[in-house]
Each structure stands twice: as structure tokens, then as C-alpha cells.
Image: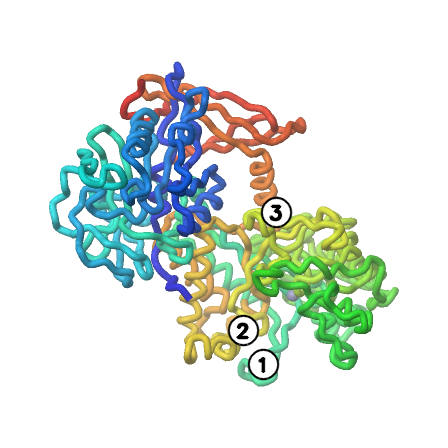
């Protein structure tokens, strides 16, 4: 496992350096807002792609191969004289490594001079960027620190961010040595004489006492940011603090609300053998949430509670000893948990229906969970339940189960129901609410009838609790039990008939993710899922387990899973730090996927006043706050879905931007072009300018020209 944990990053600096600083007029120069990544075959640039993809900004990768030399003039300039790129990244620093001849280097420099394009270089040798070399090269983990000269601007990056250099190979600049007055490179046809551009180098990143990064201003006006090391996506130091978005989402789901969750047989919590969330638990989380915001400004976390209404009936029936409410009793096991799976000798769960021997009984052939089987078969495409197959498990009488429901019984017999109905001081609205079906029946192989029962009864429960009309409730997107039913066309069609067209996925299963773009939802197809157009919203699993309420319980299960991997037992502090690092890495890629936990994780049982959920969120927030001061918030399922749809719509528009720069450096116009086919709809084109953002409307397939005011673009030598 690559070192991880670390600090954060360059990308902030990378993008800060390339970011739009300005815009122009009377059009001496047109610059397209695209970033060129210049690299060589086989060089790892995943950290750049992850960052730029997260940001949703255009970029072009060119891998320079000396056996097929590039014409840099054609690459950099369009036939109409406009500039193709607003900035470029060299990774590694190929202009000084023998790949380019002097004519090519001078063509690039001339481009920078005439367009203002800034550059960022990785794996630069100190002498190439105005520094004296420290002859000792290393990839050891030495702490890195940003200097006061780091161009953090409005990025929201914390200047004291604790960055790690673990695994990042570099030959640093010698700390304390006076900067050189020239940036010298030798390569190819100028190997003997070299090019010695006048420059001024200002360190922006130290590794120990030496220099890992520097800002270079050349005598001719060009500007560049250079790092002495390489980078990779596994290092938090190289991933994405993104200037521009300046907001992060941390949404945690607690499935199974209203149900009781059994602990493992040998893992009781004191005398408790199961746990059902309490009102004091929820109230404690509201107080905790307020305190979290006080500790970390700009941080507002709201928990999502996907619920199963049958849990209220079960509680009321027990508390009031009444037969007036009758919880439904439907088998909620997945097919692999049925005794039939063993007695029939099934073996197709992991292989999929297509690969399942025809000699196996129909039950076995339909009891599969297609999953990634390695690089050659990452997405088993089969296992859509045959439409119309299966036997109803729910009784016909379940249809009218609500005939006996009585709100007075609910509030008298279940404090949680009373809490939701009363919504005193908006306490219930301090959480988000969504469907998790009524009795938690696994939907993988169920019929339309069973799915109808499961969603209709839960909708009726949402109504009687008063949730259905509240802003905290989601009506279009839900969480299915065990993330089931997403390849069951009957179940999906039933949910869609009830206006639910979206459900959370589980990123543990590659076939539930969008393999082309992880920032987009996966849309189901008739061929793969038995139904067209249902949206699967990606969701991360966590190491906080569904049947645990205390750190002790959770660590027993965690150590059983990871003891051999880590070579011994871990503590809860170890787990939380690993989780914080893992989640931070996803946040730095601007992933918005929510995170999965369960109702038992909200318990406060061990005298610390803290639930497992509080500990986990505190660890993640503390980790993020070491690096970034961006706003941090949560979105309910329907709003998350809307955010994904908005991004998908923007990306479907294939937007590109070009600015026109006047002779005095003023940006006189901005043209946004949609490269998609026209379909009569409008695209919203966002644009970040410094610390603020605006958006421009452009017809899909068309273009729009705006004349922004007060923006300028730095160009050394406009001609
Ligand atoms: Zn569940």
C-alpha cells in the first residue's frame, strides 16, 4: 500500500497558477481556456487528471514521443491565430531532458510570451529553475511546508498544511543557498551551450531544510511554478485542493432507522444484544453538530436517515402490547442467505448468471451478484432478474396494512415516532429523511407486487409522520436494502411508478458505478438492469459496521478483517486516522458521493458521550481542516441527485471557453461554445473569476459572447 496519509497539496498551486486571472477587448489576442498536459509515454499523470476531472475543467494530454516529433506551432496555435491553451503542465520537465531541440523550446517560450500562458513543471532539476542542487536525492518521508511566498490566493488552502513527501522522488534545491540569476537548461541540439534565461526563483515549498517547489519569474516576463519531485494520485500531497469549487460535501447515511439491529452473538454491548436508536441519541447529535460548527467555522453537517416504517409498528406492538398494529413479516434475506443456496449446491453468486452452469437449478442461476472479478472482467454484465419471475413473499393483506394505523398509537408507543411527528423546535428537521423500504426486504429477486408493498407502505408512513411534506425529506431518491434490486427490472419499474427514479449504489461493487466518469451517476439500461433510465448515485462504504454501537465491537470486527494485513491489532484511533485519510483523498478529488453507516452507529453507550458516527466525522473534518478552509456541508439525497444531474448536464454540453485580450491586457470578451449537438435546450456555463463565480447561458450546440468587466490577463508581450 502506498504511503498515504499525508498532507495535501500541489494541485492547488498548479491550478492557482494556471487559473484565469483576467479577460480582454479589441481582440488582439484570443486564448482558449484549456490546459495542455505535456508528458512522455509511460509517465504517470493520474494526479493531474484526477484533479482536473474533479474540477470539470478542460484539459488536453499530449505524450511527446521523440520518434514522432511534434510541431509545436501547430499544437499551440489554431489556424485562425488564436491560442489553444491558457497554460500548460510539463510532467516531467521535458524541455530540459533531451526530448526537445532548441527550436521547439523557443517556440514554447515565444508562445508563453505572446499569450501569458503560465506553466507548471514536475520533476525539475534545481539548476533548470534557478536553484543550487542539493546532491542528495531521496523519496523518504520528510515533512514539507509551504512558504509565505506560496501563491495560495483565494484557494482556501491552509498555509500550514502538513504535507508529506513519502514516496515522492526528488532532488531538491539546496536550502539557504542564494538563488541563481539564470535558469539554465541543456538538451538535445543545445547540449553543449545550453540556454541560460535570466530568472528570479522564489521558494514556495520546503522539504525539510531544502527546496521542493519554487516560483520562477523569467527576465522576459514568463512565469512558471516548478517542483523538484514527481507526483502520483496515491499521495494526498499531489491531489486536488481545487481553487474554484471551494466547497466540499460530507454526507453520511444511517440506514435502517426505526429498526432494531442485532449485534453479533459474542459481541453484546453490556447486556444489550441489539440496538435501536433513541431520542436522546438524536438530540445529542444535534448538540454535537452545533459544537462542531463552533469548533470548525464553515462546517455544517446534517445526517441522512433512510428509514423503514415497519420498525415503528414493531416497537408500538411491543410497547403497547396491542394487536391494533400488525407489523408485516416478510423474509428480508438475500438469496445467498437462504438455506436453498447450500442445499441446492448453488455456486453462482460471484460468477454471474451467464457463467452459471445450465445444470444448476433456476434458483441458483438467478441467485448471483455480478461483481468485478479482476482486470479482465471488471464488469460482469449479466444478472438482470428475468422480468416477471419470482414469487410474492408479502401477503395480499399487506396492501391494506395501514388500515389500522393510528397516529395516537404511534406517538404513545414509540418515542422516535413522537419525536418525528412533534418536530419540536425543528429537531426532526435537523436530519434528512429518505426511504429504505418498509420492512427491509431484499429486492434482488422480488416481484413487482412485493416492491409495491415495500414502497407504498413506507410512503404512507412518511405521510402519517408528517415527513412527506417537509423539506428535509427526499421523494425522488432512496436507499434500497442491502443496495438490492438495482438489476431487477420489476423492482425498478415499481419504484419509478412511485416517482422514485434514483437510488444509492455501493462503490464496493464496480457494476454499480459509472465506469467512464465517477462524478456522474450510472443510468440503468434494459439490457443490464431490466429497466431503462433509473439513476444509481455512487456511495462509499465505511469501516464503521452496521451491527456495531461501540468502538470495542467495531474493533473486534475490524481486527478480524485486517489483523494479518496490518500485522497486528489496530486501535480505534488507528481506524479513524485511516478512514480520515481515505475520505480526505476522495474529498480532494471533489467526489460528492455520500458515505454509508447504519442506525446502530448513532448509539451513545460507552460513557464517552460519543457515538461511532461522531468519532468518524470528527476525524474526517479535523483532517480536512488541516488543509483547506472551504465550506463543508451535507446534501439530502434529492439535492445530491440534483447536483449530479446538473454536472451531467454541463458535461453533456461539452463547453469550451475563449477569452479575447486587448492590447492593454484587459479582457474584452468571453466566448462560450457548446460542442454538443443542438437540441433546443440551454446550457449553464460556470466561470470562476478570482474569488467569485458567475454563469453564462448558452444554447446547446451554439455559442454565446459576453463582455465581462474589470478582468485582465497578464501577457508579457502582446503583439
Ligand atoms: Zn439497510
Please indicate whether residue 592 sits to the left or right of residue 692 in the image: right
Q: What secondary structure is found at the residue carrying circle 1?
A: loop
The residue that label 2 is drawn on is 549
Residue projecting furthest to the top: 26
Residue 412 visible, this orientation: no
Above-or-below relation of 242 to 679: below
Left or right: 184, with 691 as reference point: left
**In the rendered structure, which disc, 3 or 1, sits on the residue that comes first in sequence?**
1
- Crowding at mark 1 (Cα within 10 Å: few <14, some 14-19, many 20+): few
Residue 466 horizontal/vertical position (percent): 69, 53
Q: Please state the total of marks drawn on the protein image.
A: 3
Work out how far the residue at label 3 is from the one at label 1, CA to CA, in angstroms. 38 Å
- For the point 33% across and 52% down, the residue is 230
**Figure coloring:** rainbow
In the rendered structure, the answer to whether residue 483 lies left or right of residue 90 reads: right
In 3D space, how far apart are the residues under numbered discs 1 and 2 (Cα atoms)?
A: 10 Å
Q: Residue at x 28, y 31 (%)?
A: 106
Label 3: state its secondary structure: helix
Q: Quadrant of residue 223?
A: top left
Locate residue 449, reporting x and y percent: 83, 60
| Residues at marks 1 and 2 touching, judged by CB atoms closer than 8 Å | yes
Q: Along the polypeptide, which appears first: circle 1 or circle 2?
A: 1
- Residue at image coords 79%, 56%: 490
Measured Cα–Cα span from mark 3 to mark 2: 30 Å
Residue 702 picture quarter = top right
Q: Which mark is residue 272?
A: 1
Whichever of callouts 3 and 2 sits on the residue coming sooner in the sequence is: 2
Instruction: State which quarter of the image contains the C terminus.
Output: top left
Residue 250 vertical position relative to residue 646 in the rendered view, above or below: below
Judging by the rendered image, the residue that carries numbered circle 3 is 641
Amino acid at each position: 500500500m502506498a504511503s498515504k496519509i499525508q498532507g495535501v497539496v500541489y494541485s492547488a498551486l498548479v491550478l492557482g497558477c494556471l487559473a484565469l486571472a483576467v479577460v480582454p477587448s479589441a481582440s488582439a489576442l484570443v486564448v482558449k481556456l484549456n490546459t495542455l498536459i505535456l508528458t512522455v509515454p509511460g509517465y504517470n499523470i493520474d494526479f493531474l487528471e484526477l484533479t482536473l476531472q474533479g474540477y470539470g475543467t478542460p484539459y488536453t494530454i499530449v505524450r511527446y514521443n521523440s520518434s514522432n516529433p511534434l510541431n509545436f506551432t501547430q499544437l499551440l496555435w489554431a489556424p485562425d491565430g488564436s491560442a489553444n491553451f491558457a497554460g500548460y503542465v510539463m510532467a516531467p520537465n521535458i524541455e530540459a531532458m533531451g526530448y526537445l531541440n532548441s527550436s521547439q523550446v523557443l517556440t514554447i517560450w515565444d508562445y508563453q510570451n505572446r499569450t501569458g500562458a503560465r506553466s507548471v513543471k514536475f520533476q525539475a532539476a534545481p539548476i533548470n529553475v534557478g536553484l543550487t542542487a542539493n546532491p542528495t536525492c531521496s523519496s523518504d518521508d520528510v515533512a514539507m511546508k509551504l512558504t509565505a511566498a506560496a501563491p495560495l490566493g483565494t484557494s482556501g488552502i491552509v498555509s500550514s498544511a502538513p504535507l508529506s513527501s513519502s514516496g515522492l522522488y526528488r532532488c531538491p534545491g539546496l536550502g539557504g543557498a542564494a538563488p541563481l540569476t539564470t535558469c539554465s537548461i541543456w538538451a538535445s541540439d543545445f547540449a553543449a551551450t545550453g540556454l541560460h534565461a535570466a530568472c528570479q526563483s522564489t521558494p514556495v515549498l520546503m522539504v525539510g531544510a531544502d527546496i521542493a517547489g519554487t516560483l520562477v519569474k523569467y527576465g522576459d516576463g514568463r512565469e512558471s511554478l516548478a517542483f523538484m519531485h514527481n507526483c502520483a494520485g496515491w499521495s494526498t500531497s499531489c491531489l486536488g485542493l481545487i481553487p474554484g469549487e471551494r466547497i466540499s460535501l460530507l454526507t453520511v447515511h444511517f440506514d435502517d432507522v426505526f429498526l432494531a439491529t442485532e449485534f453479533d452473538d459474542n459481541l453484546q454491548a453490556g447486556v444489550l444484544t441489539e440496538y435501536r436508536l433513541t431520542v436522546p441519541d438524536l438530540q445529542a447529535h444535534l448538540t454535537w453538530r452545533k459544537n462542531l460548527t463552533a469548533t470548525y467555522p464553515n462546517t455544517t453537517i446534517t445526517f441522512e436517515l433512510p428509514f423503514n416504517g415497519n420498525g415503528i409498528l414493531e416497537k408500538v406492538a411491543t410497547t403497547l402490547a396491542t394487536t391494533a398494529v400488525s407489523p408485516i413479516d416478510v423474509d428480508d434475506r438475500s438469496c445467498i442467505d437462504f438455506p436453498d443456496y447450500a442445499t441446492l449446491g448453488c455456486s453462482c453468486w460471484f460468477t454471474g448468471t451467464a457463467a452459471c452452469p445450465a445444470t444448476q437449478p433456476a434458483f441458483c442461476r438467478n441467485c448471483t451478484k455480478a461483481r468485478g472479478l479482476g482486470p479482465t472482467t471488471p464488469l460482469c454484465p449479466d444478472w438482470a432478474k428475468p422480468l416477471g419471475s419470482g414469487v410474492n413473499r408479502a401477503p395480499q393483506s399487506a396492501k391494506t396494512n395501514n388500515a389500522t394505523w393510528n397516529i395516537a398509537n404511534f406517538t404513545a408507543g414509540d418515542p422516535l415516532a413522537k419525536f418525528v411527528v412533534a418536530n419540536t423546535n425543528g429537531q426532526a428537521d435537523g436530519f434528512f429523511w429518505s426511504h429504505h423500504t418498509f420492512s427491509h426486504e431484499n429486492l434482488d429477486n422480488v416481484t413487482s407486487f412485493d416492491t409495491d408493498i415495500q414502497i407504498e407502505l413506507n410512503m404512507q408512513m412518511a405521510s402519517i409522520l408528517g415527513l412527506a411534506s417537509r423539506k428535509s425529506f427526499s421523494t425522488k431518491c432512496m436507499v434500497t436494502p442491502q443496495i438490492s434490486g438495482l438489476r431487477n427490472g420489476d423492482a425498478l419499474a415499481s419504484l419509478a411508478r412511485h416517482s422514485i427514479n434514483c437510488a444509492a449504489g455501493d462503490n464496493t461493487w464496480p457494476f454499480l458505478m459509472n465506469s467512464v466518469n465517477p462524478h456522474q451517476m450510472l443510468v440503468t439500461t434494459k439490457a443490464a438492469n431490466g429497466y431503462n433510465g433509473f439513476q444509481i448515485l455512487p456511495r462509499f462504504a465505511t469501516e464503521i459496521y452496521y451491527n456495531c454501537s461501540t468502538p470495542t465491537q467495531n474493533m473486534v470486527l475490524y481486527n478480524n478483517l485486517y489483523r494479518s494485513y496490518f500485522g497486528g491489532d489496530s486501535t480505534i484511533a488507528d481506524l479513524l486516522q485511516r478512514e480520515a485519510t481515505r475520505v480526505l483523498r476522495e474529498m480532494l478529488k471533489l467526489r460528492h458521493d455520500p458515505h454509508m453507516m447504519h442506525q446502530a452507529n448513532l448509539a451513545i453507550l460507552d460513557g464517552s458521550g460519543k457515538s461511532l458516527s461522531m468519532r468518524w466525522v470528527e476525524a474526517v473534518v479535523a483532517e480536512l481542516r488541516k488543509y483547506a478552509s472551504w465550506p463543508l456541508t451535507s446534501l439530502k439525497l434529492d439535492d445530491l441527485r440534483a447536483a449530479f444531474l446538473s454536472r451531467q448536464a454541463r458535461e453533456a454540453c461539452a463547453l469550451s471557453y475563449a477569452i479575447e485580450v486587448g492590447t492593454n491586457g484587459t479582457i474584452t470578451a468571453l466566448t462560450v461554445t457548446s460542442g454538443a449537438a443542438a437540441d433546443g435546450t440551454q446550457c449553464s456555463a460556470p466561470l470562476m473569476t478570482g474569488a467569485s463565480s458567475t454563469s453564462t447561458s448558452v444554447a446547446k450546440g451554439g455559442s454565446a459572447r459576453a463582455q465581462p468587466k474589470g478582468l485582465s490577463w497578464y501577457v508579457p508581450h502582446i503583439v
